[in-house]
Structure formats: C-alpha cells, structure tokens
Amino acid sequence: MKNFAYSRADTVEGAVNLFSQHAHSKFLGGGTNLVDLMRENIEQPDALIDVTRLSPAGIPDAGIAELAGGGLSIAAAVRNSAVANHHLVRQRYPVLSQAILFGASGQIRNMATTGGNLMQRTRCYYFYDEAARCNKRRPGSGCDAIGGFNRMHAILGASEHCIATHPSDMCVALAALDAMVHVEGAGGKRTIPMNEFYRLPGDTPHLETNLKPDELIVAIHLPALTFAKNSRYRKVRDRASYAFALVSVAAALQIEDGTIRNVRLALGGVAHKPWRAYTAEQTLAGAKAGRDTFERAAGAELSEARGYGYNDFKIELAKRAIVGTLSELAEAGGTR
Ligand SMILES: Cc1cc2nc3c(=O)[nH]c(=O)nc-3n(C[C@H](O)[C@H](O)[C@H](O)COP(=O)(O)OP(=O)(O)OC[C@H]3O[C@@H](n4cnc5c(N)ncnc54)[C@H](O)[C@@H]3O)c2cc1C
C-alpha cells in the first residue's frame, strides 16, 4: 500500500479545506471498501480525510432526525447498523432497514457509514484484478467481463465499455424511496435526487456518480411516504448471507379497492446504478392489483434487458423477483 497522509475533520468546512490540500484525497468513512481497494493498489490516495465524526448542524448526536412533514434526515456519518435499527426507519421505511440488514455482515455494518455505502465501488471481479482489462480501473483498456465470467453483471443500461453493477443494497431502497442526497464542496451546497446521483457507464465507466471530486455527502433525506410502511426488500443471492445480490427488489405498494394507488419499485444487481423501475411503475399505477398485472409490469421493465452469457438467467430471475415481492406486499397489507 502506498504511503498516505491521514487527517480527521470535525466540520464539513474543515473536510473540504483538507481535501484541497492534496492532489488526490479521499474521504474516509468506515474504510470497509476503501481500505480493501488501497491494499490492492486500485485506489492510491495521497491523503485520507476521516469524516466519521461529522454531524450536520441541527442534527443531534444520533445523526437521524425527523424532518417537518414526516420525512427523515440521516447524516452521512451514521453507521449502517444505526440506520437499520432506528425505530423511525423500521416503522416508516421497513424496506430500508431490511435492505441494510441483508447486506455484508454485522461487523461490517457496524463500521460502514451512510456516505461510504453510497460511494462503494463495484464488485466486478475484473475491476479488482490488476491483470485484467477494465475500463473502470484503466479507461480505454477494454472490458474482460464482456465475453468473460459475467454471472454477477448487468442486464440493464450497460454499454460495450462496461457491464459492472452497483453492489449496494441500501441504495436500492433509497432509489425506491426517492431519497435526496445533500452534498457540500468548495462550490457550495446542493441537493441531488438519488435517481440522478449515479451515472450509467456509457463510454466513461470510470465516472460513477455526479458528485464532484471535492464534494462531500453530508446527509440523505427521505421524503414523507406514508404508504412506505408497506414496503419490502427481497434479495436473491448465491448464499443465504454474506453475498452480494444477483438480483434484488425494493418495493412499496398501496392498494385501494383492488386498484394500485401508489407504488415504488427499484432493482439491484442488474445495472451500473440502483435501477428505478419507472416503466413497471407506470404499468402498475391505477391498474387492478393481481398477478397478471405484476407479470405485465415486470415484463415491460425487463423488455430492454440483455444478458451477456453467464448472466442470461438474471432476466427471468428479475421478473420473478418483482412479481414475488409485489404479491407479498399485496397480501401483507397493501389492500384496504
Ligand atoms: C466482505 C464484504 C461484504 C459486503 N457485502 C455487502 C452486501 O452484501 N451488500 C452491500 O450493500 N454492501 C456490502 N458490502 C459493502 C459495504 O456495505 C461497504 O463496504 C460499505 O457500505 C462502505 O462504507 P464505508 O463507510 O466503510 O466506506 P469507505 O470504505 O470508507 O468509503 C467508500 C468510498 O466512499 C467515499 N466516502 C466515504 N464517505 C463519504 C462521504 N461522506 N462523502 C463522499 N464520499 C465518501 C470514500 O472516499 C470511498 O471512496 C460488503 C463489504 C465487504 C467488505
């Protein structure tokens, strides 16, 4: 591992100032992804700025606060376990709590931060293998996942330059819930909708988000969404625990008199970013709730999907995971 400078920031302003002092700085959350990448020489920062002590003004020590109107603010430094176990998250957004608890292990969730989870890198094997070609690691070098062993890889929104997927479970729930990402950098503060935060690979797969290099994630805001009480996360993976998603589904559903009044749906493990299933949502909204409708919506969402050989099975798997999750929600309390 290359030598690096380490500093701890106590304020957002301090973190942004420290960032500007080194040519290649990185913010450090729990380090559960970044330190692994540094050990493999894939990330080689000159300086690490520890941002685990930051708490935005107005948010108490726990880092999770109610917003006017019923939403929640979660500071970037809040650990994944604290978010998953917070009583308001469990009551109002069970899909978020479940998504986090389906990820990694207890020890990793105790270290990992909200900001770090958003910014974690792909788990594409070729990205981690310095002997392999990877446009994300070395732009212009090629992509060995295409034509290689690509069981984990993307079926939606991929490009001829990259078929990697975003690995986070938490972010799939945040995409379904229309979370807002609050960021701050030398140029000031701004808010980015979660569904505009990530980029598709196109011909620049090394650019994964729309965050500027000096910008720090400060907090995530969850809007009030009363029907999200009836929400769920389903994760399909090779092992029952400690494995990344092959396909996952985050969904919230409200049915009135047999008709779908509100629905939110996002997929994980299928694209370079958490995939908000807008096409399926359009098919579902106002339709009669039931298996036929759920199947039609899943088919519409996956109509543009493409497999790359080893991951062809994911197309059917994603459809079935959508139908299964919506059926469970319809039975569990989506109806009144
Ligand atoms: C063995 C293992 C299994 C795992 N399994 C799963 C799984 O099943 N599902 C899942 O979702 N995840 C899984 N993870 C990933 C884990 O969730 C991430 O490693 C973790 O969320 C990253 O959080 P962190 O705070 O440790 O980030 P770090 O490693 O500290 O940082 C990651 C990136 O985020 C940047 N960063 C950190 N904070 C900020 C901020 N405030 N603003 C801007 N940039 C920031 C860092 O500079 C770095 O680039 C697994 C990890 C491991 C090691």
Image (cartoon, helix red, strand yellow):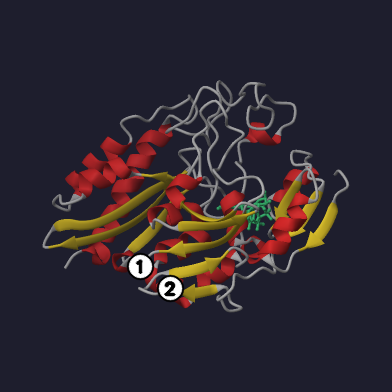
Locate residue 44: give its quadrant.
Answer: top right
Question: Which residue is painted at 47% across and 30% down in the image?
Answer: 158
Residue 266: x and y, percent?
Answer: 38, 48
Q: In which quarter of the image is residue 264?
A: bottom left
Q: What is the tally of numbered marks visible in this picture?
A: 2
Three-letter residue code for mark 2 = Leu
- Place of residue 286 in the rendered image (x, y in percent of width and height, measured from the top left): 15, 52
Q: Is residue 118 visible?
A: yes
Q: Do the residues labelled 2 and 1 touch (CB within 8 Å)?
A: yes
Residue drawn at x 38%, y 40% is 317
Amino acid beneath label 1? Ala
Decide which of 49, 42 is in the foreground and name it: 49
Name of the residue lying farthest toward the front:
187
Q: Nearer the viewer, mark 2 or mark 1?
A: 2
Residue designated by label 2: 67
Percent position of residue 35, x then y: 75, 51
Question: Farthest residue in the left direction?
Answer: 257
Residue for point 75% across, 50% down: 20
Q: Mark 2 vs mark 1: which is more N-terminal?
A: 2
Figure check: 34 above or below 252: above
Residue 224's tag is 1
Separation (CA) of disc 2 from disc 1: 9 Å
Q: Decide: few, some or many residues near mark 1? Use Cα within 10 Å; few <14, some 14-19, many ≥20.
A: some
Q: Does the residue labelled 1 lie within 8 Å of ligand 1?
A: no
Q: Can residue 104 be seen here?
A: no
Is disc 2 surrounded by few (<14), some (14 to 19) or many (20+) residues within 10 Å?
few
Left or right of residue 93: residue 105: right
- Tell me the number on the disc at residue 139: none
Left or right of 82? Residue 20 is right
